[in-house]
Amino acid sequence: MSRVELERFFYLDDENRKLIAGRRQDYTRLGFTLQIVTVRQLGMFLADPLGAPPELDDYLTEQLGIEVSSCVEQ
């Protein structure tokens, strides 16, 4: 997945950020965010969020200001 595709399809807008802000833990925020962007793009939730491409995890954690390594295992 290219950076252009990530920016086009998985950018978090202000409304997304408001929804995400209510989640307490970094791993919860990442998981919730992943579900938001995938349902918006694919029209369905992921059966296994851990199967998301690493580039997507990296892009989302960059936007959230968290480290992916601290979240994915949890």
Image (cartoon, rainbow, N blue to C red):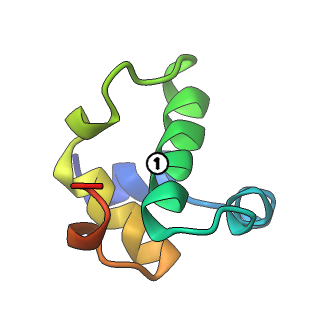
Amino acid marked by disc 1:
Gly
Q: Is residue 11 left or right of residue 17?
A: left
Where the C terminus falls, by quadrant?
Answer: bottom left
Image location of residue 43, percent across then percent down: 57, 18
The residue pinned by badge 1 equals 31
Q: Residues within 10 Å of mark 1 (few under 14, many from 20)?
A: many
Residue 18 occupies which quadrant of the picture?
bottom right
Name the residue rendered at 21%, 33% in the picture: 51
Under tag 1, what secondary structure? Answer: helix
Image location of residue 11, percent across then percent down: 55, 58
Image location of residue 64, percent across then percent down: 51, 74
From the viewer's side, name the closer residue of 50 and 6.
Answer: 50
Image location of residue 69, percent across then percent down: 20, 70
With respect to residue 49, does 46 lie above or below?
above
With respect to residue 47, does 72 lie above or below?
below
Q: Is residue 3 left or right of residue 17?
A: left
Residue 72 occupies which quadrant of the picture?
bottom left
